[in-house]
Amino acid sequence: MTADLDADASGQWLFHCHLLYHMMTGMSRVFQYSTLIEITKNEAKPQNFVKQTSYHNRPIVRVDETRPIDVMLVKHPMAHHVGLWLSTFLDIGTDPFHNVQRLTYKGLYGRDYNKLELFTNDAEMNKGKIENADIDIFYWHLIDQFWAIKGGVNYFYRPAKTPYWQPGIGIEGLMPYFIDTDVRGYYYSGSAKLDIELSRDTQITNNFFIRLGIRSILASKTVTEAEIGSGLNQMRYIVRPYYRLMPGLNVFAEYENEQDYGVFKNIQSNNGESTNQNTLSFGFSLLF
């Protein structure tokens, strides 16, 4: 197929399918004049025709000399000026039937490829008592279009009896079939802990989605005072239908089944904590 485009602006153009999941799987391309790089380096002068083509109707159209090309389109892979950027994600939900509240917060602050990440995942309050709460303070580095590596320290508050600091590393990104992946590893008092989280959002209509997710927590050694058990500690399964009210703002209903296992289950049971929990939460998520 031959597409004929009469462009009147310098630089690059993104051609893409308007179905988001089509575009993200590769149905998008960036087009530019073949002389774009040479022109920004002042090695070539804009001209009316870049080259004639074999098509009968028109050559590749002109490079605009009236509006100079922004050199950042060529020098910077993100096609914008280098600067400091910030992004904050906030996810708040409550289960009114069991009096359980949850909060997930993620902030990325810095340049395109190197950022400070602040991340607390599923901080939970159950009947007025904090059951889960910790925060990653990580250096975050984008290694390609879909993956980032990270590392730093984690402040673990609950369910440990005494809060503590621990080093941590991780990798996050998008696997094939749109599987959102976040794997983090920590080390405390001789025990290596692995936190694996996988989820996938399926678009049903333009603004309605369903998320399926699974989270697993494992450890190599039991540390009773930190409430870490050797082997499999916990599994969580979620189903979340959500509706996009506007870009960056969703409302959701989420069912989660949380099950403890092995040594960790015994620790929780001895402390009088629940070892199996089902919650139905309602809330919103905000990206700004």
Image: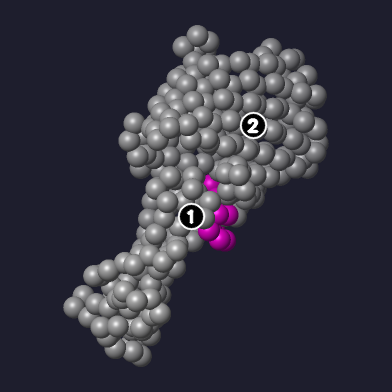
In the visual, does 109 lie left or right of 210?
A: left
Disc number for residue 27: 1
Label whose residue precedes the other's in the sequence (2 or 1): 1
Image coloring type: one colour
What's the residue type where badge 2 is placed? Ile
In the visual, does 1 lie left or right of 44?
A: right
Check whether the beta carbons of the residues at disc 2 and disc 1 lie within 8 A of each other: no
Residue receiving disc 2: 214
In the rendered structure, does residue 142 fall within the stretch colored magenta?
yes
Q: CA distance from mark 2 to mark 1?
A: 29 Å
Image coordinates of residue 147 in percent, x first then y, are 58, 54
Image coordinates of residue 210 in percent, x first then y, are 51, 29
Specify whether residue 221 is in view.
yes
Q: Which residues are magenta?
A: 137-147
Residue visible at 31% across and 76% down? 58
SS at badge 2: strand
The local crowd at label 2, few if under 14, some if 14 to 19, many if 20 or more residues have their Cα within 10 Å, is some
Can you say whether 217 is above or below 124 in the image? below
**Quadrant location of the N terminus?**
bottom left
In the rendered structure, does residue 6 fall within the stretch colored magenta?
no
**Quadrant location of the C terminus?**
top left
Pick the front one: 160 or 60: 60
Can you say whether 159 is above or below 164 in the image? above
Image coordinates of residue 39 in percent, x first then y, are 33, 84
